[in-house]
Amino acid sequence: MMKIGLFIPCYINAIYPQVGVASYRLLKSLGLEVDYPLDQTCCGQPMANGGFEGEAVNLAKRFDELFKEYDYIVGPSASCVAFVKENHSGILAKEHHECTSSGKIYDICEFIHDVVKPAKLNAKFPHKVSIHNSCHGVRELYLSSSSEMNVPYYSKLRDLLSLVEGVEIFEPQKVDECCGFGGMFAIEEPEISVCMGQDKVKDHMETGAEYITGADSSCLMHMEGVIKRNKLPIKTIHIVEILAAQL
Amino acid sequence: MTSKEWILDSIRQHTQTKYDKPELSVDAITYNDKQAKFCDILQQVGGEFYVLKENEDLNKVILELNPDAKRIGSTLSYITCNTYNPDELENSTELSGTDLGIVEGVFGVAENGAVWMDQNVKHKALYFISEKLIIVLDKNKIVNNMHEAYRQMEIGKYGFGVFISGPSKTADIEQALVIGAHGPKGLMVILK
Amino acid sequence: MSTKHSIAAAKFAANKEQATWHNETLWMVRAKRDRLSKEIPEWEQLRDLACNIKLYSNSHLEQLLQEFEKNATANGAIVHWAKDAKEHNEIVLGILRDHEVKHFVKSKSMLAEECDLNPFLIEKGIEVVETDLGERILQLMDIPPSHIVLPAIHIKRQQVGELFEEKLGTEKGNSDPTYLTRAARKHLRDKFLNAEAAMTGANFAVASTGDIVVCTNEGNADMGTSCPKIHIAIMGMEKIVPDQEALGVFTRLLARSATGQPVTSYTSHYRKPREGGEFHIIIVDNGRSQILGKPEHIKTLNCIRCGACMNTCPVYRRSGGYSYTYFIPGPIGINLGMLYSAEKYFDNLSACSLCLSCSHVCPAKVDLGEQIYRWRQEMDKIGKASKEKKMMSGGMKFLMERPKLFNSALWMSPVVNILPRFLKYNGLNEWGKGRELPEFAKESFNEMWKKNKVK
């Protein structure tokens, strides 16, 4: 039986623990052996994207340590998973370390869609949702076809949501335009970041959806900030909370 | 050390990985009806086309379609409706004020409505300075795409050639498309 | 922790009407590009080929440039080599002086911008007229371009109307684009007919034939080179392609990526000088050979200057070309600026959320976003890293490497939720400029797990 290590990113730990709980429940409901190695902190992405990759070395080493016993590392954050997958090996290579995590880490949606492949889910969510296709999810983890490329359309998030009873699925017009979070970008260029966030929320609202949902709580947190400041009639919810809605 | 030597030396010093030349084989798009595609795209880019029928007189058709053209320039032997022959003029600037230029194309490209012109007139200005340009083209000489085009494209004695696709245009003011910038304001391809 | 870009961008974005128009208009160009690229089933194959042809060409420049020179010279062209911008300008001046040129017409060339050619020639008493409509508008207004393909995208028709009324004598209050374009046609037709020399850039230079290829819509490059008999074509070294076959790939990608057209109105091949005329070609280095020595950034030389990266960049669309400190804006501008002088142009590195849309839209597969990430890692080494960012990163590192400390912080963090607004939202809080802060959970996931509450 494959041993799965649950990866809980720092801000999910601190701000959206319910996403972690939903992830755990969802994986367990699919008959998987899930464990959470204690005292996780951060994958190092905020430092690295800001230009301080070197600050993430110890975090990358610790990450490998924490998860060395597991066959798969699964986490509810496309962005953090993409960072470990794409960047940890480069960061560790500079220290002559071989990265053991990047080859076995998955975003939870990716994992369920590609590895577990359930025929159905015990989930009900009778609401209109607009899929937020986060940049790293699309362009680094290939969770959906990127709008820039001439490839046949596919969307792993849409496929998973189709297994949920009652849900009505929409996508915004600019289907994968960046929401403007970008880590430190959000505070280094706050005016542009907020402008992008406002435009993105507006695009989602124009679908008529009640919820914005996606695989990245970082994007959702940024859009939630805009929604609350402007008192807009739309909510955000991580996709695993929808997939685990009955659990 | 000349600048050329300096530059070549700098290139030599800095070049690292030498990449191989790729094989240029593309499964490029082809069309069942190249003529139809050519005409369709030509119209989309602001040009016009006319398919000359068996018994139609080319010169008569040109005059009928361009009743207001006063100064018509052409070097083609089969064009009789022209009012002057640009090859007889000394300077290209003398072509200014040509209402209609009539020239011949070598082949057309279906994917983008372009016609390859291998300069065969003394003043290439004729292609650009005319208010309107008519290109006469053999309708059997249309290729599918630019790969096919470049495989057969040649440049003759005048040392200039151009793919012309539709009339000149610009969208430099607020992205509003205006047909007719500095080159011809209208372009028609007559297929015969 | 502002940068020159963030400050300028904030000003641009503050004018909501202008920023929205700029954003939506450029998005439309991206949308047109999408429509056309999706009509070509082999589009991704073409991108791969374009990338590989460029990687090959730019790693064989010594051979290809010499092959080009040999063939161009045999065709009757005169080939010059310029180490840098200064030499380039002097060569141009030399040619113009040799022929006593007083009236010089130019079609668009970012290379000429790079070398600051116009002010140099004007100072020497030569009339230099930009003939591309957008560039001419900007020349008359005495301001620089804000986009490499749509240079006057930031200018409204009313402004052009007022400008032409003053400079060309057009009707007062008439800002119809067609009317104004016709007025420019008449005005520039005069310039073409009276010019003594013309300059074009080069989209491509073909080694096997010695051709210079120029792609335009307005017909201004061809009008310029059809009237006066002296043609000066200037090219950055990286414009070289091995043969005609390669052009099949590039001419299918260029206009579709740049403006959403199947091809430009004119794809001109200049091979020989005109009868009784001269055809000069200037090959320019100006730092390009040094880029060859930077394997992590070598793909910037693939760039075919289509501007698609600008049209897709969510930051460029909302901040405008003038918010960048390098003369070329957007993702390619950020990278070219850093290559030209990292010390001078690092401010532009903040203009990126690392969304990677640019890398995916680029017809020549330049890894634009990935390179920006790599450049950010270089900042500390050259002493240009933002002090605040460095402090924050250091702070995060300190916290995240100490799980006990991190857990304590999580335990204490809900306190922030109930702080009075004036403490949370003030000038020091960049997040708070337009967003509410998230709420910290009363119990972190880690705590819940420890208390066996995760089931």
Image (cartoon, rainbow, N blue to C red):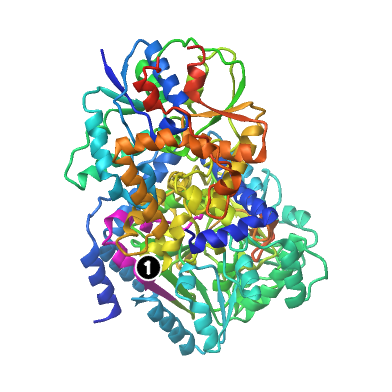
Q: Residue furthest left?
A: A96
Front residue of C452/B70: it is C452
Find out whether residue B75 is within the magenta segment: no
Q: Is residue A216 visible?
A: yes
> In the image, residue B167 lies at what x, y percent?
65, 57
Tell whether C215 sits left or right of C346.
Answer: right
Q: Can residue C216 be seen by looking at this rendering?
A: no
Q: Name the spot of residue A105 as percent of width and height, x first.
A: 31, 29
Q: Residues within 10 Å of mark 1 (few under 14, many from 20)?
A: some
Secondary structure under tag 1 reads: helix
Q: Quarter of the image holding residue A124? A: top right
Residue B110 locus on image (x, y percent): 54, 44
Give the amino acid type for the residue marked by disc 1 in the picture. Answer: Glu
In the image, B154 versus C171, the foreground residue is: C171
| Residue C388 drawn above or below residue C370 | below
- Residue occupying the point 52% across, 20% down: A242
On screen, residue A217 versus residue C379, left or right, reads right
x and y percent of residue A1 in the render?
25, 12
Up-down relation of residue A52 to residue C4 (above or below)? above
Q: Give the number of callouts.
A: 1
Instruction: Check the image and report above or below for C339 versus C389.
Output: below
Residue at point 57%, 36% (across, down): A224
Quadrant for the C terminus of chain C in the image: top left
> From this viewpoint, which residue is outermost toward the right?
C172
Q: Nearer the viewer, residue A93 or B27?
A: A93
Query: Which residue corresponds to mark 1?
Result: C343
Compared across the picture, whether C427 is left or right of A109 comes to right
Per the rendered image, the range of residues in magenta is C280-307
